[in-house]
Image (tube, coloured by chain):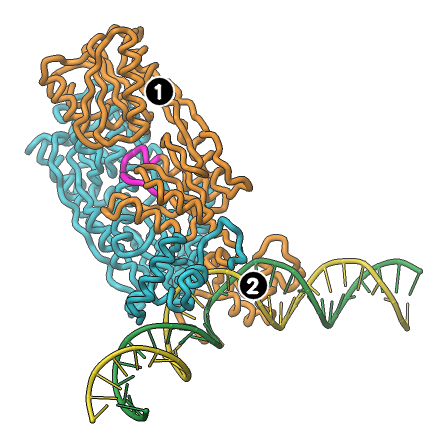
Chain colours: A orange, B cyan, C green, D yellow
Amino acid sequence: MSHRQESSFVSAQQVADLAGVSRSAVSRTFTKGASVSEATRERVLKAAETLGYQVNQLARGMMNDRSNIVCIVTADIDAPYHGQFIEALTRHLQAAGKVAMLVNTSGGSGIESAMRLTLQYRAEASIVLSGQPDRRIIENCIRNGQRVIVVNRDEVADGTRNINVSNRAAAREAFAMLHRAGCTRLAVIMSDVGTPSLRARETAFVEAARGKGLAVTTVRAGPTSYETGCLAARQLFGGPTPPDGAFCVTDLLAFGFMDAARRDFGLSIPADLCVVGFDDIMQSKWAAYDLTTFRQPIEEIAAYMVSQTDRAPDQTTSTPRRFLTERVWRSTVRPG
Amino acid sequence: MSHRQESSFVSAQQVADLAGVSRSAVSRTFTKGASVSEATRERVLKAAETLGYQVNQLARGMMNDRSNIVCIVTADIDAPYHGQFIEALTRHLQAAGKVAMLVNTSGGSGIESAMRLTLQYRAEASIVLSGQPDRRIIENCIRNGQRVIVVNRDEVADGTRNINVSNRAAAREAFAMLHRAGCTRLAVIMSDVGTPSLRARETAFVEAARGKGLAVTTVRAGPTSYETGCLAARQLFGGPTPPDGAFCVTDLLAFGFMDAARRDFGLSIPADLCVVGFDDIMQSKWAAYDLTTFRQPIEEIAAYMVSQTDRAPDQTTSTPRRFLTERVWRSTVRPG
DNA sequence: ACCGGGTTTGCACTGCTGTGCACTATAGGG
DNA sequence: CCCTATAGTGCACAGCAGTGCAAACCCGGT
C-alpha cells in the first residue's frame, strides 16, 4: 500500500513490497558487483519492470557523492562551433555513463549564476566553453571538490584543467599562406570580445606579418558573428586601404566577410581576395564558401575533456594539454 | 568538526556549526517564505559566504519531489535548427528557475536509453525534439508523474503535451508561390527519415500540386543534411526531368540543393530554378543563400514548452497547441 | 511582576538509496 | 550425521535538506 501520491516516481521500497523482498535486495540488484542470488534478482527485475522502476540517481548521488552530472556552461549555443562541441561532449559523456547539464550564460543572468547552478546540482565537473569566470568563483568550485575544465584561458587557477589549441602556430601559418599567395595588404577580421584565444590568433598573425615588414589592419566590428563579418568587409572595402588578403579569427566571421565582399563589392575569391578562417565548422566545406581554414580537433578535445572529468587522485595543477590544429586547404586562397 | 573529506561539497550542517545555529536555521534562510530573524539570517549568510555553501538541489529535490530538472532529448544537436531550439529552451528554462539536462540520442544508445536517463534523474518533464519514442516508454514516463512534451507527433498518447506546426498550410503556400512564379516541373527534396512533420510537408505539397494537375517527383537521398541536398540535385539534374521549382522540406537540404545546382550544373537562382525552404534557420538569410522559406516561431514554441513543463493539476490530454509559420520572402523565388 | 500574543528556534521525522555488519540457510566434506 | 565455509539476506545507519510541532523567546500592556 503506497502512501505516496498516485502519479509520482516509483521507489525501491515499492518494488521490494511487490517482489516480497527487502529493499536492500532491490538496491543490490541494481548495484554492480553486489551479492544477490539469481532467484531474487529475477523476482526484483520482474517487479521493477512491472512498476516501471528506475534507480533514483539523485539519491544514489547523495550517497556516494558521485552525481555523474557534468555541467557545460557556455553562451551562444546556437553558434555552429558550439553546437558541434556540445554534440561531441554529450555523446562522450553519455558513453562514459554521465549526463550533461547545459547551462546557458546568454540569458542575462551571467556566468556567476551559472557556476552557482553547477555547485547546487553537485556536478562533478564544469566544462567552461565560453566566458571568463571570475577567479574567485573558480576557486570556490575547486574548494568544493569540483573539477573545472577550461579552454584557452591562459591564467591557470590552482586545480583547473586547462586545454590549449595551437592558436599562435596556426595564425603564423595563416600569414605564411597569404604571403605565399602574394597578398600584401593584409587584414585581420576580429571580434570585439577579448577572448584569449581570439586575441592570440590576432597578435600572432600581426607579429608574423611584421616580421616580413608588412602592416596589418585589424577590424573589430562587433561580436563573433556572421553580421560582424559583413560589417568588417564594408568598413574595409569602403575605406582607403582595401585588403587583398584577410585572416578571419573565426569561420563565422569569414562567411559574412566573404558574402559582403562578393555581393557588395563584386570581388571574386581567391582572384581578388584571399581568405583564411579558423575552426573548420560544418559550413566551411559548403560549396558556397569552400573555405580554407584550420580544423580544431573537436572530437579529440571533447574526448579528452570527458576523461578529465573523472575525479583524479591528485589535485595538483596539471600542465595544460595542447591540441594541434590541422590546415585544411580549400579554395579561398590562391595556391602559392 | 567535519568528518568529511577535505575537498568535498559544503553541507548545511557545516554552515550551521560555523554560524552557531541549528541546521534548521540554515535551511530556513535559503527557503523562500520561511521564518527567520534578520540577525540569524545574516549570520548564516555570512558563514555560507565564507564556506562557499550552495544549497544541494539534489537533496532538496528529493524532499519535495521537484528536481527542477527538465530533459531535452534529441539527436543531431549540431544541426542549426536544433541548436537554435536548444538555445531558446535553455534560456527560457533558466529564466523559470529550472535547468536543462541535454540527452543526446545520436550516440548509438538510442532513445529508450535516453528516456531511462530522464526517469533516473527524476526530471519533471521531458522535451522530445527528435526521434520517435516507443509508446510504452512514454506511458511509463507519464505513469511516473513526468510530463512529456512532443513536437509534431500525431499519435497522441494519454497525457503528452503535443505541439504542432502548420506544416500542411505552409507546404500548400509553398506550392502556390512556385506555381505563381511559373514553375511547372516540380520536385520535393525530402529526407529518408520518416518524421511526421517532414512527411506532412511533402504530402501536402504533392496534393496541392495534384489539385492543379501538376506532377511532383520526390527525392529521398539520405538523412536530413546538406550533403543529402547535394545528392538530390545531382540525381534530379542528371536525370531525364530536371525541375524548375523545388520545395525543400528543410533549409539545410535547400542549401545543399542550391549549391550543387549552381556549381555542378551552372544554374542560376531564381532565373532557372526557384527554391523554397522550411525553418528559416540562421543561415537562411546569409547572402550566399538568401532563401525564401517559412519561419518557425522557435522563441514562442520554446516559451510555450517551458510553460507546459510545470506540473499541472489535470492529467487529462490537452488538445495540441498549434503554431503558425510565417512566410519569409527572400530571393530564391521569382516574384509572381 | 505577570500575562498574553506573536515570532524564532530546535527537535525529530521524512524522502531515497548504498553498505557494513550480523545473521540465516545452504551445501559440501569428513 | 555433524561441522564449517560461504553465499544471501535484512537491519540499521549515513548522507542532505525541508517542515510540523512544541518549546523558548521577546515585546508590550496592565
Q: Nearer the viewer, residue B213 or D1?
A: D1
Spatial CA span between label 2 and label 1: 59 Å
Q: Is residue A68 left or right of residue A335?
A: right
The tag earlier along the polypeptide, 2 or 1, is 2
Element assignment for label 1: helix
> In the rendered view, would you say A244 is above or below A325?
above
* Residue indicated by mark 1: A168
Q: Position of residue A294 (x, y in %)?
A: 35, 21
Q: Is residue A92 left or right of residue B250?
A: right
Q: Residue at x 25, y 48 (%)?
A: A109
Q: Nearer the viewer, residue B164 or A308?
A: A308
- Please tell me how crowded label 2 is: few (under 14), some (14-19), or many (20+) other residues with Cα within 10 Å: some
Q: Which chain does the residue under circle 1 lie in?
A: A
Q: For the residue marked with disc 2, what is the amino acid?
A: Lys
Q: Is residue A77 magenta?
A: yes
Element assignment for label 2: helix
Classify the position of the C terminus of chain B by image quarter: top left
Q: Which chain does the residue under circle 2 lie in?
A: A
Residue range of the region highlighted in magenta in the rendering: A73-84
Residue A46, numbered label: 2
Q: Is residue A325 left or right of residue D11?
A: left
Q: Position of residue A186 (x, y in %)?
A: 22, 13
Q: Residue at x 54, y 58 (%)?
A: B3
- Please tell me how crowded label 1 is: few (under 14), some (14-19), or many (20+) other residues with Cα within 10 Å: many
- Disc 2 and disc 1 on one polypeptide chain: yes
Q: Is residue A239 magenta?
A: no
